Image (cartoon, rainbow, N blue to C red):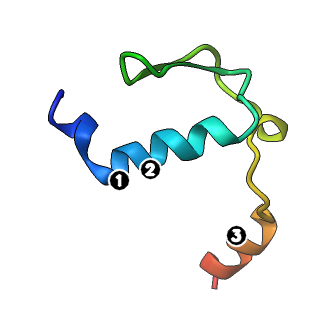
């Protein structure tokens, strides 16, 4: 929606996303505020520093 594009949180997210390395599996069109997933990412393609095993252990208790 056009009104959403003016919100500070949306503008901050757009600014923040332009600072990082582009993800090969996502196409972003900043002019139209849209994006498209090009392919399903594999775990090595997701840039989040997380230890999945620790999450599994926490929730399996």
- Quarter in which the C terminus is drawn: bottom right
| Image point (57%, 47%), residue name | 16
Reply above or below: 11 against 27. below
Report the mark closest to the observer, 2 or 3. Answer: 2
The image shows residue 2 at horizontal and vertical percentages of 18, 27
Distance Cα–Cα, label 1 vs label 3: 32 Å
Circle 2 — which element?
helix
Q: Earlier in the sequence, mark 1 or mark 3?
A: 1
Position of residue 3 measured from the top left corner of the image (x, y, whole percent): 15, 35
Which label sits on residue 56? 3
Discs 1/3, front = 1
Marks 2/3: CA distance? Answer: 32 Å
Q: Is residue 37 left or right of residue 12?
A: right
Q: x%, y% of residue 56?
A: 70, 69
Quick one: quadrant of the N terminus?
Answer: top left
Query: Residue 37: image x %, image y %?
Result: 55, 20
Question: Distance from label 1 to label 2 (Cα)?
Answer: 5 Å
Numbered disc 3: secondary structure: helix
Q: Residue at x 74, y 41 (%)?
A: 46
Task: Using the image as rendered, state which of residue 59 and residue 44 is in the foreground.
Answer: 44
Residue 57 tag number: none
Residue in the picture at 21% in, 38% down? 4
CB-based contact (under 8 Å), mark 1 and mark 2: yes
7 or 1: nearer the viewer: 7
Tags 1 and 3 in contact by the CB under 8 Å rule? no
Query: Which mark is drawn over residue 12?
Result: 2
Which residue bears the numbered disc 1?
A: 9
């Amino acid at each position: 929606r056009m009104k959403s594009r003016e919100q500070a949180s949306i503008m901050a997210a757009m600014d923040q996303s332009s600072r990082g390395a582009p993800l090969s599996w996502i196409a972003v069109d900043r002019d139209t505020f849209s994006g498209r997933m090009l392919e399903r990412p594999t775990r090595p393609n997701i840039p989040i520093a997380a230890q999945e095993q620790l999450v599994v252990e926490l929730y399996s208790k």
